[in-house]
Amino acid sequence: MAEAESAPALPDHYFRREFGRLVSVLSRRFGVHRVQLCEDAVQTALLRAMQSWPQRGPPEDKSAWLYRVALNEVLGTLRRQSRTEASNASTEELAADSSTEDEVYLEQEVSDDQLRMLFVCANPEIPRESQIVFALKILCGFSTEEIALRLFHSHEAIYKRLQRARAALREHIEDLEPPGLQQLANRLPAVLEILYLLFTEGYSSAQPEQVIRRELCEEAIRLGRLLDEHPMGAVPETAALVALMYLNAARFDSRVDGAGGLLVLEEQDRSLWDRELIRIGVSYLRRSARGERFTRYHAEAAIAAEHCLAPTYRETRWQEIARLYQALDALAPSPIHTLNRAIAIAEWHGPDAGLALLEPLNPPSWLLGYYLWDATLGELYRRRGDRERAVVHLTRALAAAPTHAERGLLQRRLQACSIAGEI
């Protein structure tokens, strides 16, 4: 009975934690040009688990069970597709390789296979925007809706990019073995961006019911550490990205209240911050300082460290955070960085100073539809005492906010405007 009650958590848990690694293992065995076949086989295995485990109970080794079911599904499909004696022989050779060592292989080789797949996704034959979409879908189990939200594109555009990536793999890549070392180095920026987006979705989820999705953040950290241990991945920007992830993960327990509501930095109980994760994050940040290269990951990790190391919210070095956001905007220009710098300046010099940075901007259309643009303006106008403008912007932000927790936060701010108006 207890197993049946836990069944609703199974799809998300296994889709997120098992889907990517199983697809990676199977794609290496059968060729990455068959990745869609491998995807379908893993989805079938997950569906069968959802149907049978609640009644029969899960097997002792869930991962090995899923692997075996998915493997048999791939072999069965290949046999049905076989049309010549030669192809039959090839399929039977693959089947013969599926020995009793498969379960051991899964445990020993899966990490390397996922890292290889990350670099395969970054193949230059695949357009850069399709690389990111493909990796987030195949390795991380993102839906097209989640990817669209993170990349500020429509669902249709993301679907087309995913199809282009699969077509490029079928045309240009026949196996999952990594290319030469120099090619791997050239692909590293795309790999880092994939991990950054994975962690971002976990830290600030696009799912309406979830503020934080820890399993995604844990997976991003695991892959980041794995990359940092790889000869071509052990570079300062990798260490900076891992530092950023650890420093943000340290605040998980303080970001939501008992009812699942979102707590902003000023409201968080700092005694709940994980000091061990902060220590690890700072150690990675120190390691990232070797050499002369300063990247967006260095800037963002330094900002996270400023927050984590500040004794209190009021004692935060807002002038340093504003400077770091300015440096970040120079490295990777984006109005989002300007938005964050305005928040830091407002904390440093007051809401008028923050608004002075934002009001002259001519933001792109996608930013005007992004809820944080209106949420920031609304909060700064509220602090300045301009209730009418605050209500306009906060109402727009409330309508566009993607999660219940973020809508709850905006409703609290709108309520504060109403109370101020009554006073």
Image: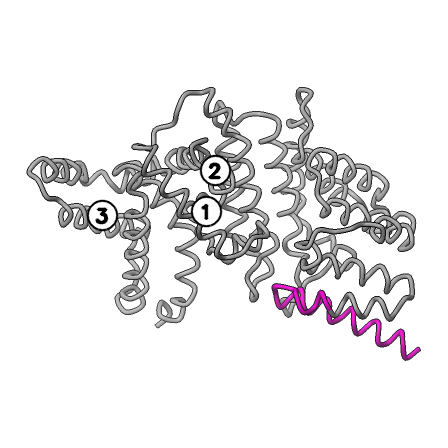
Where residue 15 sits, quadrant-wise, is: bottom left
Give the amino acid type for the residue marked by disc 2 in the picture.
Pro
Which residue is drawn at the image coordinates 59% and 49% (left, top)?
200
Check disc 1 and report its element: helix, strand or loop. helix
Which residue is drawn at the image coordinates 34% and 35% (left, top)?
109
Contact, mark 2 vs mark 3 (Cβ under 8 Å)? no
Vertical placement of residue 300 versus 396, above or below: above
Residue 60, given in percent of the width and then of the height, sits at 29, 54
Residue 199, given in percent of the width and then of the height, sits at 56, 47
Which residue is drawn at the image coordinates 34% and 46% (left, top)?
22
Q: Give me the C-alpha separation between circle 2 and circle 3.
A: 28 Å
Q: Give me the C-alpha separation between circle 1 and circle 2.
A: 8 Å
Where residue 27 sits, quadrant-wise, is: top left
Vertical placement of residue 305 versus 402, above or below: above
Contact, mark 1 vs mark 2 (Cβ under 8 Å)? yes
- Neighbourhood count class around disc 1 (C-alpha, 10 Å): few under 14, some 14–19, many 20 upward: many
Left or right of residue 261, residue 73 in this image: left
Report the span colored magenta: 396-423
**Prevalent SS, magenta region:** helix
Marks 1 and 3, the one that precedes in the sequence: 3
Q: Which residue is mark 1?
A: 161
Give the amino acid type for the residue marked by disc 3 in the picture.
Val
As for residue 411 lying within the magenta part, the answer is yes
Q: Give me the C-alpha separation between circle 1 and circle 3.
A: 25 Å
Q: Find residue 83 and name its label.
A: none
